Image (cartoon, coloured by chain):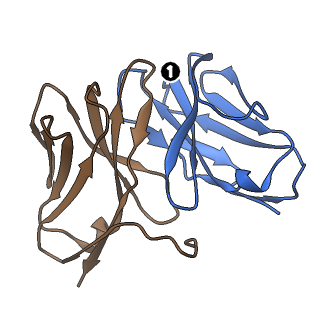
């Protein structure tokens, strides 16, 4: 079983559309994250939730809205997609908010045309 | 595939040699440091971590060294294997909330 799974793996869409990426972890972890990796491989945190509570909210446009229905799921919804949103988005989880050992999903490559 | 024009720092080593990947971090208040490995098409994978009250930590075939005086971190891989080929990232944590700041990454290429 995949520990951190995210869907879809690839997403190609037009500017202005709204899209969602889903993430689920079956590790029983308390903390989940969304990271964005750009074309230069630079990884930057976007959000983090601990037991469904938002604990990290980096400076991202408010077109990006995370939702955590329970501690095993953290979804990312993006409104009014722009060309600059094209990137690989990684979901991750960790046992708690103290450890730096994050378990990453395989990534969702978003291409905005 | 890879992006056109992507130029990560690259380290090329012969199979069986030792590799040393270096990282300079920015914040002297960082209390915790981690190394991640990212293979092509996959998510980053945790390798080893070290807290700021230590200067060395060893794992299986890997050693992390921390020099807080010059804000430098290194990852040593012993007897490098083809499976070690990947992009390696250092990350530092400053403050609460487990916010990790990742470095730019180093591409390790293992030549047979």
- Residue closest to the eye, A54 or A81: A81
In which image quadrant can residue B84 be found? bottom left
Residue A37 sits above or below residue B97 on the image: below
- Quarter of the image containing the C terminus of chain B? bottom left
Q: Give the number of marks.
A: 1
Which chain shows up in brown? B
Asked where in the image residue B33 lies, by quadrant, the reply is top left
Q: Residue at x 42, y 21 (%)?
A: A96
**To which quarter of the image does residue A47 belong?**
top right
Q: Residue furthest bottom?
A: B112
Q: On the rendered structure, is A55 left or right of A9?
A: left
**Relative side of A61 to B25, left or right:** right
At x 57%, y 76%, the residue is B4
Name the residue at 20% across, 45% down.
B73
Q: Give residue B103's position: percent from left, percent from top.
A: 38, 48
- Camera-nearest residue between B70 and B39: B70
Residue A29: horizontal and vertical position, in percent? 48, 25
In the rendered image, the vertical position of residue B90 relative to residue A30, given as above or below = below
Residue neighbourhood size for the residue with mark 1, other residues' Cα within 10 Å, grouped as few (<14), some (14–19), many (≥20): some
Label 1 secondary element? loop
Query: Disc 1 marks which residue?
Result: A30
- Chain shown in blue: A
Chain letter for mark 1: A
**What x and y, as percent, mark residue B88?**
34, 57
Percent of width and height locating residue B92: 33, 36
Q: Which quarter of the image is occupied by the N terminus of chain B?
A: bottom right
Side of B55 relative to B8 (left or right): left
């Amino acid at each position: 079983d995949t520990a951190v799974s995210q869907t879809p793996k690839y997403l190609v869409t037009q500017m202005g559309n709204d899209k969602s990426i889903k993430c689920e972890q079956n590790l029983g972890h308390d903390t989940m994250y969304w990271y964005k990796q750009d074309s230069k491989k630079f990884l930057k945190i976007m959000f983090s939730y601990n037991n469904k509570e938002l604990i990290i909210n980096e400076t991202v446009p408010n077109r990006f809205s995370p939702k955590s229905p329970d501690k095993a799921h953290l979804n990312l919804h993006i409104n009014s997609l722009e060309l600059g949103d094209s990137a690989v988005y990684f979901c991750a989880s960790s046992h708690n908010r103290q450890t730096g050992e994050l378990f990453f999903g395989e990534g969702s490559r978003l291409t905005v045309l | 595939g890879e992006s056109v024009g992507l130029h990560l720092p690259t380290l090329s080593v012969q199979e069986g040699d030792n590799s040393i990947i270096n990282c300079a971090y920015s914040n002297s208040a960082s209390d915790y440091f981690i190394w991640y490995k990212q293979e092509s098409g996959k998510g980053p994978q945790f390798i080893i971590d070290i807290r700021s009250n230590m200067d060395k930590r060893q794992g299986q075939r890997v050693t992390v060294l921390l020099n807080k005086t010059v804000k430098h971190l290194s990852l040593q891989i012993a007897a490098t294997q083809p499976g070690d080929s990947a992009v390696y990232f250092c990350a530092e944590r400053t403050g609460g909330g487990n916010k990790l700041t990742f470095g730019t990454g180093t591409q390790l290429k293992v030549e047979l």
